[in-house]
Amino acid sequence: MAASKLKQDETTVRRTRLLELRRQGVRYDDERILTLGYSSPAAARRDLNRALAAHRDEEAAEVSVYRQQENERLDALLEAAWPRATQPSPVFDKDGNVLDHALDMRAVDTVLRLMDRRAKLNGLDMPVKAELSGPDGGAVPIGPVTAAELHRLIGAAGDGDPEDTPEDSDDDSHTGQN
């Protein structure tokens, strides 16, 4: 059975206040949250999850509508460019004589850009995989390092000459420490 308008409004107000308190870092077991009408911290947590899920569903619906509109625009543009990109048209000399038949390469480029845009819009392209590795393909060293060590790493990555590094020093002025 659907909740009454009054009950829906009360739920919205309670969830809004719950969201405000959680954004401030207030814990679920805090009295300020429990006085909103929750029987337990777990009930407050469940209600917050329901509110966030509803918000995600609304956003997903809006994105879906926008994506559909953009796809329709791309369809119209593609329909206009497609014939010139796929059907050879006559190539004339300066006297108006037909020399040859060729595709309009600007139209071909336009079609390819439209197709690329559609693939990005709809997530059709495979994600680009990137891997960060340290010197000689090993693990990236993590921890406190000196400026000289950073310069050596940059040089090893090909962005500089590893021989052009300042010597290690006890002067920490480059880090802002005294």
Image: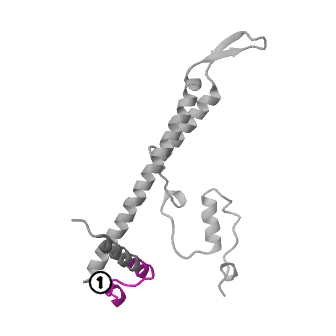
Residue type at mark 1: give it.
Gly
Residue 143 x/y as whole percent: 52, 74
In the visual, does 66 lie left or right of 97?
Answer: left
**Marker count (numbered):** 1
For the residue pair 100 and 64, the one nearer the viewer reads as 64
Residue 153 lies in quadrant: bottom right
Q: Quadrant of the N terminus?
A: bottom left
For the residue pair 39 and 116, the one nearer the viewer reads as 39
What colour scheme was applied to this rendering of the protein? one colour
Q: Residue at x 26, y 83 (%)?
A: 40
Residue 122 x/y as whole percent: 45, 45
Residue 150 x/y as whole percent: 62, 69
Q: Is residue 144 above or below residue 104?
A: below
Q: Residue at x 58, y 30 (%)?
A: 81
Query: Which residue in the protein does label 1 denote?
Result: 37
In the visual, does 20 lie left or right of 4?
Answer: right
Q: Which residues are magenta?
A: 18-36
For the residue pair 177 and 57, the one nearer the viewer reads as 57
Q: Secondary structure at mark 1?
A: loop
In the visual, does 176 lie left or right of 13?
Answer: right
Q: Is residue 103 magenta?
A: no
Q: Is residue 127 above or below residue 161?
A: above
Characterize the local packing of mark 1: few (<14), some (14-19) or many (20 or more) Cα atoms within 10 angstroms.
Answer: few
Q: Residue at x 52, y 39 (%)?
A: 74
In the visual, does 24 lie left or right of 37?
Answer: right
Q: Residue at x 42, y 50 (%)?
A: 64
